[in-house]
Amino acid sequence: MSKLPFIPSLFFKTLAVVIVLVISTWWAVLKFTSYEEMIPADYGGTFISTILLSYLVHLWLMPMDDYPEEYEDETE
């Protein structure tokens, strides 16, 4: 596997949006449900999930101009 595709400026913009969405979701869950208390596992899992989701959205939004349109089959 070669280098993972990564555009830092796009990733950090995506990360900022995802963080806002995560904080809004936390607020809504704590305000409108019977979930009363956050435990340390909630924070750790949310931190890891936020970074992974940001990277996946970053890949989805990344321009595809840098990649070939068709991948050739190496078995030919």
Image (spheres, rainbow, N blue to C red):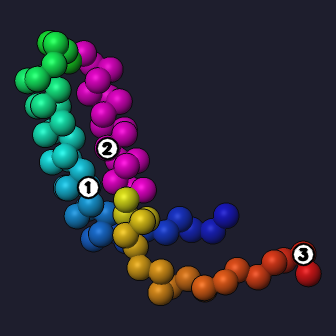
| Circle 1 Cα neighbour tier, 10 Å, few/some/many (<14 / 14–19 / ≥20) | many
Residue 75 placement (x, y as % from top left): 90, 75
The C terminus sits in image quarter: bottom right
Q: Which residue is mark 3?
A: 75
Q: Which residues are magenta?
A: 39-56
First of labels 3, 1 by sequence position: 1
Q: Earlier in the sequence, mark 2 or mark 1?
A: 1
- Report crowding for label 3: few under 14, some 14 to 19, many 20 or more residues within 10 A (C-alpha): few
- Are dots 2 and 1 in contact, CB under 8 Å? yes
Q: What type is the residue that disc 1 sits on?
A: Leu
Q: CA distance from mark 2 to mark 1?
A: 8 Å
Three-letter amino acid code of the residue under disc 2: Thr
Q: Find the residue positioned furthest to the right.
A: 76
User: Residue at left 37%, top 49%?
Assistant: 53
Residue 22 occupies quadrant: top left
- Mark 1 lies on residue: 15
User: Nearer the N terminus, badge 2 or badge 3?
Assistant: 2
Q: CA distance from mark 3 to mark 1?
A: 39 Å
| Residue 45 picture location, percent across and down | 35, 30
Name the residue beneath numbered marker 2.
Answer: 50
Q: Secondary structure at mark 3?
A: loop
Q: Please tell me in which quadrant of the rendered image residue 38 appears.
A: top left
Q: Residue at x 16, y 13 (%)?
A: 34
Residue at the (81%, 78%) spot, across then down? 73
The N terminus - image quarter: bottom right
Q: Amino acid at mark 3?
A: Thr
State the residue in front, 1 or 65: 65
Give the left or right position of residue 4, taking residue 38 as reference.
right
